[in-house]
Image (tube, rainbow, N blue to C red):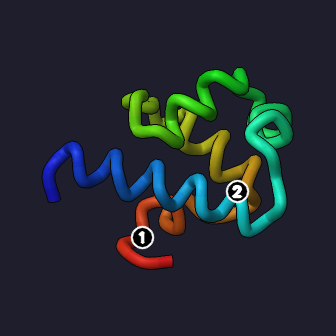
Amino acid sequence: MIKSDVISIFSQNMKELRVKKGLTQEELSFKAGLHRNYISDTERGRRNVSLKAVQKIASGLEVTIQELFAQTI
């Protein structure tokens, strides 16, 4: 798996999980303690997120970190 694949998988999973939970980007940003623009950029694959941000996003979505990186969810 190359770097761009990891970012693509993460961003797609993040958006899919957020939508499945019925959350807006703004609601997720509040739950995760991150700016809405950060959430938006991450979902579009425009951010190379830190491990701390990954943890916050997983917590905000109430999923495991592994779920955010799963090949299929």
Left/right of residue 69 with respect to residue 67 in the rendered view:
left
Task: Return the x and y of residue 36 as percentages of the image width and height.
Answer: 71, 26
Name the spot of residue 12 as percent of width and height, x first: 47, 56
Comes first in the chain, label 1 or label 2: 2
Taking the spot 51% from the left edge, 35% from the top edge, the residue there is 42
64 vs 14: above or below: below
Q: CA distance from mark 1 to mark 2?
A: 15 Å
Q: Secondary structure at mark 1?
A: loop
Quarter of the figure with residue 52? top right
Q: Is residue 40 left or right of residue 7?
A: right
Report the quarter where the N terminus lies: bottom left
SS for tag 2? helix
Question: In the image, 2: left or right of 47?
Answer: left
Within-10-Å neighbours for mark 1: few <14, some 14–19, many 20+: few
Which residue is located at x 59 percent, y 54 percent?
A: 15
Whole-percent x, y for residue 32 in the image:
75, 37
Amino acid type at circle 1 is: Ala
In the picture, residue 37 is in which quadrant? top right
Which residue is under mark 2? Answer: 18
Cβ atoms at labels 1 and 2 below 8 Å apart: no
Residue that label 1 marks: 70
Q: Which mark is residue 30?
A: none
The amino acid beneath tag 2 is: Arg
The crowd level at tag 2 (other Cα within 10 Å; few <14, some 14-19, many 20+) is: many
Name, please, the residue furthest toward the bottom.
Answer: 72
| Residue drawn at the location 42% of the way across and 78% of the way down | 72
Q: Nearer the viewer, residue 42 or 65?
A: 42
Residue 26, image x, y percentages: 81, 34
Residue at the extreme left of the image, as rendered? 2
Question: Is 42 drawn above or below residue 2 in the view shown?
Answer: above
Q: Does 70 appear above or below 35?
A: below
Q: Nearer the viewer, residue 66 or 25?
A: 25
